[in-house]
Amino acid sequence: MTPSSGSSLNYEFNKDLKSFNTLGLPGCARQFASFNSLSELISLLHDARRQQLKVKVLGGGSNVLMPPRVEGLVLQSGMAGVTLLRQDQDSVWLKVDAGKNWHDWVLESLEYGHGIENLALIPGTVGASPIQNIGAYGVEVADVIDSVQGICLSSLQLVTLSNHDCRFGYRDSVFKRELNGDFIVTSVTFRLQKRFQPNVSYGPLASWAEQLPGFTAQQLIQQVCDIRSSKLPDPDEIANAGSFFKNPVVSAGQAAELKQRFESVPGYPQQDGSMKLAAGWLIEQAGWKGKTSGNITMHAQQALVLTTNGHATLDDVESAYKAVQKDVAGKFGVTLEPEPQLF
């Protein structure tokens, strides 16, 4: 099926998607289009509805498991603008288009305010950041999001969701639950603080900060980048999706039982009394750090990172991560949940 007669929209057919996902999995989209304005996006969505095509949105491809064939229409935002909305004595509100590279936005944010320095070097786009509620080193993007703008596919209406409406959780949001598959993020409004009040609660950052009193926001970003680079492989050099599993959260009772059996198990108390465990430690103790299974390897420096040799398929990835899950569950009675989602 081809686009409707007389359409001025630009489509690519049987688009190779391998370069659009950091795991390097082969994939092909029946139809693909990028958009550079809201009006163009709406026209694409109307055209897809006329053709009865299912719509999927691709960001930076850093958190997806790509199937061999994607039926329907794959859309990608080419919008990357930053708009200053308002400010007061303490804060500044900025609307950032969904297609903007996330790390580029972190660097640019210093021109306006502070709050996302700890999230430097996370791959992906601004539009993907609220879906996953990206986080690192004591900071989550939910901490600085004022609202999320987007289009509901079922109604083709432009809507704005407040921070509360987004129902953010640990690597979770309403976009992964009730609105999954029915919402395209078009922009995110951030509230940044004018005063630099860094969060250096994370161990390596805390020790670094003690040795460098009076450090700047730029220095903090550089330190975060150095830490990430030392722990996580560059996707341009080794295909990977960053941390592949979420850190599991268990009840206080289960945490106490695990502590009795495994004295050195790392645990981070949560406000509700539960305990967050370090997935990387569990994977390492289960014997998977640096272990290779076919085209898949759990990284030798950080067992939480699943890497491929560039020849892996979706089946290879699923087989490997399920084997990791099985061994961790067998040893600790803990179920690991993958962060990347099937596209």
Image (cartoon, helix red, strand yellow):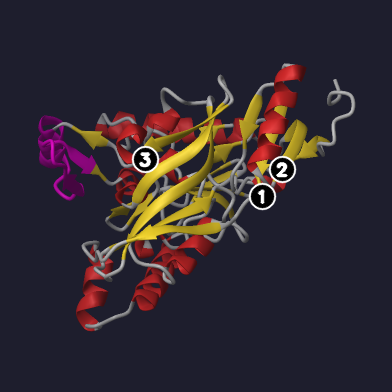
Q: Which residues are magenta?
A: 252-276
- Pick whichever, 315 or 330, lies toward us: 315
- 263 falls in the magenta region: yes
Task: Kindly tell me whether residue 70 is visible in this rendering.
Answer: no
Label 2 secondary element: strand
On the image, numbered disc 2 is attached to which residue?
34
- Pick whichever, 334 or 92, lies toward us: 92
Disc nearer the start of the sequence (2/3): 2
Q: Do tag 1 and tag 2 residues touch (Cβ < 8 Å)?
A: yes
Q: Residue at x 14, y 47 (%)?
A: 263
- Circle on res. 171: 3
Q: Residue at x 53, y 58 (%)?
A: 82
Left or right of 128 on screen, residue 138 = left
Disc nearer the start of the sequence (1/3): 1
Disc nearer the start of the sequence (1/2): 2
Dividing the picture into quadrants, the one containing residue 326 is top left
| Category of crowding for the residue at label 2, using alpha-carbon neighbours closer than 10 angstroms: few (below 14), some (14–19), many (at least 20) | many
- Three-letter amino acid code at the position of disc 3: Arg
Horizontal and vertical percent position of residue 214: 24, 83
- Circle on res. 262: none
Task: Kindly tell me whether residue 208 is visible in this rendering.
Answer: yes
Disc 1 to disc 2, C-alpha distance: 6 Å
- 230 falls in the magenta region: no
Horizontal and vertical percent position of residue 170: 31, 40
Above or below for 186 versus 93: above
- Three-letter amino acid code at the position of disc 2: Ser
Disc 1 to disc 3, C-alpha distance: 25 Å
On the image, numbered disc 1 is attached to which residue?
78
